[in-house]
Image (tube, rainbow, N blue to C red):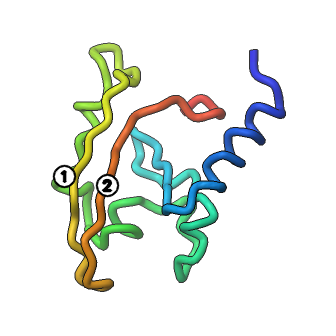
Amino acid sequence: MRFEGETSLFYGLFDAIPFGIYVADINTYEIIYVNQAMHEAPSSLVGKPCYQEIYGEHSPCRFCNIQQLRNAQGKPNGETLVHERFNEATDKWYQLQDKCMAWPDGR
């Protein structure tokens, strides 16, 4: 059973983190949430494919390890994958941490 306040708390915690966080649907790659730190991006990211809007790719990224983050039943396995990526547009390296989790809407 979920309470409405739990969802608000969930979003509130993500928004309090000063680093950019985005959540993408594991099946469609659609961005379903960005925290406040990501809202400084030049356009709205929600509803668009993460590989296109975040990484400028035309298809899922070569480093996307979705299958490694799920168990045989397709559920989150609790693992976190950490990798780095250089962004030529910002001339910076970024540490990325990927984790599979259930979102409040069931995705």
- Dot 1: what SS? loop
Residue at screen point 26% across, 67% down: 58
Left or right relative to 54: residue 42: right
The amino acid on which the numbered mark 1 sits, given as a three-letter code, is Phe
Please determine whether, in this image, residue 62 is positioned above or below residue 13.
Answer: below
Residue at screen point 49% across, 62% down: 20
> Could you classify mark 2 by the number of other residues whose Cα lies within 10 Å: few (under 14), some (14-19), or many (20 or more)?
few
**Closer to us: 8 or 30:** 8
Furthest-left residue in this view = 62
Q: Tell me the number on the disc at residue 63.
A: 1
**Closer to us: 51 or 1:** 1
Q: Are marks 1 and 2 in contact (CB under 8 Å)?
A: yes
> Could you classify mark 1 by the number of other residues whose Cα lies within 10 Å: few (under 14), some (14-19), or many (20 or more)?
few
The mark closer to the camera, 1 or 2, is 2
**Closer to us: 18 or 38:** 18
The amino acid on which the numbered mark 2 sits, given as a three-letter code, is Leu
Which residue in the structure is indicated by mark 2? 96
User: On the rendered image, what quadrant is the C terminus found in?
Assistant: top right
Residue 67 % position (x, y): 25, 32
Residue at screen point 34% across, 21% down: 77
Please determine whether, in this image, residue 58 is positioned above or below residue 34.
Answer: below
Left or right relative to 49: residue 58: left
Residue 56 % position (x, y): 30, 73
Q: Quadrant of residue 10?
A: top right
